[in-house]
Amino acid sequence: MKAVRIHEYGGPEVLVYEDVDRPSPNAGQVLVRVKAAAVNAVDVAVRRNSFPTPKQPPKTLGSDGAGVVEAVGPEVEGVAPGDEVFFSGLGVGSEGTYAEYVLIVPVQAVPKPAAVTFEEAASLGVAFSTAWYGLVRRAALAAGETVLVQGGAGGVGSAAVQLAGARGARVLATVSNPADAARVAELGADATIDRTATDVASEVKRLTDGKGVDVIVELVLSANLAADLGMIAKGGRIVGIGAGPEPTVTVPSGAAIAVDATVLFTNSGNAGRAGTAEVLAEVAQLVAQGKLRPVVGHVLPLSQAREAHELLAGRHFGKIVLVP
């Protein structure tokens, strides 16, 4: 079979499209024929070794995928050949989804909603599980609260905009250009703020009558925490999903104490395989009900994984998906 692997760490040029042996399922394993694999920032981090993983090169990249169950090993229950499934959490201690076939464990196999394509299903994994874990599990977002999503056009950001709206929150989102503003509004944002042309803090205060927001979804924590503390309401929560450019973050303690702030550091990987699958099953149900929708921006052949990683590094909207 074909797969995209790295034999060393580095830039997109280290991605190699090559022949590898097709895996066979052992006891407790499920073999899936991959129909689509999403490209995520974590794949880039693995490629660069800025996110060290137990499995070393040569290795196949890719966390998220969707496909059809080809075969199951002994002791597998609840999953059968022909099932259409999607899954997340590969490529760390195992081979990833940038391949024609992949092995998963039964708990990772989430039934694909019938109304969505494989490309759309693959795009749900990291983005929606991360947004859900931060907003629902960590921040306990309640209906009627106001959320600011910092970076509403990104994969996690666009998922957070939709999830917050589906849970009855008022949603504000920052964007970096007018085209993204229109797209994020279509996803359910009640107001968008162009951070390149507007003072975000002043606009947030205006939109909330000076109160501030209850929850901030923050993907660049080390760069934005100080500003975030000036935009939250009393008792507000800042959900730190992305670390940002610096390895450490300084908390302005006076500003934090003044508003009873809570800073929540989150890693959806802590939910584990079963926890992530449980979240994605809930996401799939909301997708089936039309309350959430995956956003696919680009679909490329698996052989063009290098181009996909280069595209991810630039300005784009929606998930980038590889198709074997």
Image: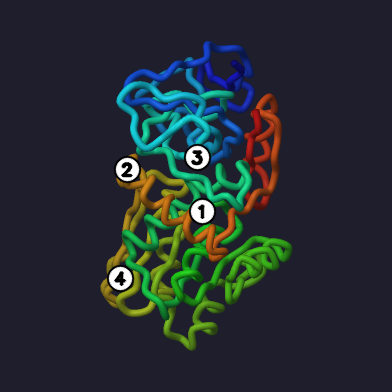
Q: In the rendered image of this protein, does residue 136 appear above or below residue 284?
A: below
Residue 223 visible from this viewpoint? no
Secondary structure under tag 1 reads: helix
The CA distance from mark 2 to mark 1 is: 20 Å
Q: What x and y, as percent, mark residue 18?
A: 62, 14
Q: Nearer the viewer, mark 1 or mark 4?
A: 1
Residue under label 1, please give it. 156
Sequence order check, earlier mark of 2 and 1: 1
Label of residue 261 in the image: 4
Query: Looking at the image, is mark 1 or mark 4 earlier in the sequence?
Result: 1
Q: What residue appears at the point 54 percent right and 50 percent down from the top-left corner?
A: 113
Q: Give the number of the disc on residue 85.
A: 3
Q: Circle 2 sits on which residue?
A: 274
Q: Are marks 4 and 2 in contact (CB under 8 Å)?
A: no
Question: Is residue 114 depicted above or below 69 in this figure?
Answer: below
Q: Earlier in the sequence, mark 4 or mark 2?
A: 4
Q: What amino acid is labelled 2 in the image?
A: Ala
Rounded to the nearest angstrom, the CA distance separating label 3 from label 1 is 21 Å
